[in-house]
Image (cartoon, rainbow, N blue to C red):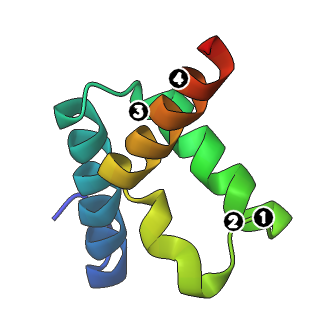
Amino acid sequence: MFAGSEGGAETWAILASLINSAKLQDIDPRHYLTDVLEHIVSGRTKINQLHMLLPWNWKAERDGSEAKLAA
């Protein structure tokens, strides 16, 4: 109703899902979305690796990287 079109509503639903999934993983949504978009735009994450950008995989990779840096 407020999205302007069916496509707009679908886009908002996807964005809301990503934001809430990040929150459920105790991730700052702004930081998460910024990093994910940078990975996609720069080509650092290939199309067959997009599943690694899901909030729970993204967090696990970050936590693993931080643990390696601390050691």
Res. 40 mark: 2
Pointer 4 and pointer 3: residues touching (CB < 8 Å)? no
Residue lying furthest top: 70
Q: Which of marks 4 and 1 is nearer the N terminus?
A: 1
Q: Which of marks 1 and 3 is nearer the N terminus?
A: 3
Work out how far the residue at label 4 is from the one at label 2, CA to CA, in angstroms: 24 Å
Residue ID at (21%, 41%): 20
**Residue underneath mark 4:** 67
Q: Which of marks 4 and 2 is nearer the N terminus?
A: 2
Of badges 4 and 1, nearer the viewer stands 4
Q: On the rendered structure, is 17 left or right of 51? A: left
Residue 45 location, x and y as percent? Answer: 68, 68
In what element is the residue under mark 2? helix
Q: What residue type is labelled 2?
A: Ile
Residue ID at (17%, 35%): 24
Work out how far the residue at label 4 is from the one at label 3, CA to CA, in angstroms: 22 Å
Of badges 2 and 1, nearer the viewer stands 1
Res. 29 mark: 3
| Above/below status of 56 relative to 8 | above
Work out how far the residue at label 2 is from the one at label 3, CA to CA, in angstroms: 16 Å
**Residue underneath mark 1:** 44
| Above/below status of 26 relative to 19 | above
Q: Which amino acid does label 4 sit on?
A: Ala
Pointer 2 and pointer 3: residues touching (CB < 8 Å)? no
Quadrant, the C terminus: top right
Q: Is residue 3 visible?
A: no
Pointer 4 and pointer 1: residues touching (CB < 8 Å)? no
Which corner quadrant of the image does residue 6 belong to? bottom left
